Image: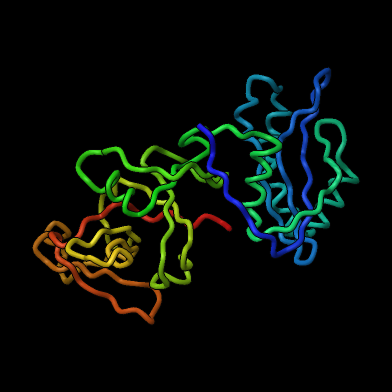
Amino acid sequence: MPAAVISISGKHHACWSLLEMVQAGRRPVPYGVLLADQETGQWAQRLQDAGAYFDELDEPEFDILTALPADLRQKAREMGGVGLLDWLEDSLSGFFRISDRTPIAYSGAQTTVDRLFDEHVDSGVRPFMTHLPVFGLRAAATKFGGDQQVDAEQEGWVRAPEDLRLREGMFVAHVVGRSMEPLIPDGGACIFRAGVAGSRSNRYLLIEKFDETDFAARYTVKKYARGGVLVEAAEREAAIRLEPLNREFEPFELTSDEFRVIAEFVQVLPP
C-alpha cells in the first residue's frame, strides 16, 4: 500500500544527513534521517526499527541500535542540532557513517524528516506497525462510531511517532477549531484510539453530536466530565458535561442519547 504523499512549503532552513549502518563484508544500509535547523538548532530524526535487524546483529550491535534514538535526542538537547551533526561527522566510524549535509527548506521538521525517510530509507507501509490510517472526521465516525465497523473512505497512511505503541483501531484525523487550544491547534492532525473502555471521566474524547447540521460542530473533541452523579452508570439518565480547554469557549451538556463517543484523543502529530 503506498503511503500518502504530503507536500510541504519551505519556511525555515535546515540541513539533513543520511545515517547509514555499516556491517563487515556488506554494503552500507540506509538507517535513518537526521535534520538540524541552521538558525534555531531544532533537531528532528527518523530511524529504522531496531527490531527489524534482531536476527542479523550480535547482541552489542543490537543494543547500540536500541539505545540510539534516545541517545541522539539527548545529545541534541545538550549540543543543539547543528552541533550534534558536527560531532557525528567528527566521531562516527565503524558501525555507523553519516552522509554529507544537504540543505533543505521546510515548514514542519518531523513531516519533512518522515518524507525524506520514505524517499531514502524505507517507503514501506506496515499498517499499525509503522503507519496509521488517515480519515476525515465523518469517515471516522462511520467506521469507528457504530456497533460494527463498516467500510469508510480512507485518505491515506501517515507515519506514527517512533515512541508510540500502535494497535488496530488507532487512526489520524484533522481537528478544526480553537476550543481545545493549546493542547490541539486549529487544523492539527491528531491520533485517536477507538474503543473507549472503562471510565470516561476527565478523558479527551472525539464525539459526534446527533441532530447537528453544522458539520464543523457535529464532530468535536472535548473533555468528558460527569454531570453531577457519583456512579458513572447513572450517567445514562443524566446530562454529561463536555468541556473545552480554551476559556473563550463555553462547556455544554448532553444526555447520552444526544451524542456518541467515537474515540479517545491520544496526541497531536508533530508538524
Question: Which residue sits at x=67%, y=48%?
Answer: 113
- Residue 6's place in the image compared with 169, above or below, is below
Image quarter (top left, top right, bottom left or bottom right) of the C terminus: bottom right
Q: Residue at the left extreme?
A: 237
Residue 183, position in %: x, y?
46, 67
Q: Residue at the top extreme?
A: 25
Q: Judge from the rendering whether residue 146 lies leftward or rightward of residue 189; answer left or right.
A: left
Residue 196, position in %: x, y?
29, 49
Q: Residue at the bottom extreme?
A: 248
Residue 123 lies in what quarter of the image? top right
Q: Judge from the rendering whether residue 132 lies leftward or rightward of residue 146; answer left or right.
A: right
> Residue 161 versus residue 51: which sits nearer the camera?
161
Question: Which residue sits at x=77%, y=49%?
Answer: 16
Residue 258 lies in what quarter of the image? bottom left
Residue 65, position in %: x, y?
69, 35
Question: Which residue sits at x=61%, y=27%?
Answer: 52
Residue 189, position in %: x, y?
48, 56
- Residue 183's place in the image compared with 99, above or below, is below
Question: Which residue sits at x=68%, y=53%?
Answer: 44
- Residue 96's place in the image compared with 106, above or below, is above
Q: Judge from the rendering whether residue 54 lies leftward or rightward of residue 264; answer left or right.
A: right
Tally of marks: 0
Q: How is the image coloured?
A: rainbow
Residue 105 lies in what quarter of the image? bottom right
Q: Judge from the rendering whether residue 210 lies leftward or rightward of residue 141; answer left or right.
A: left
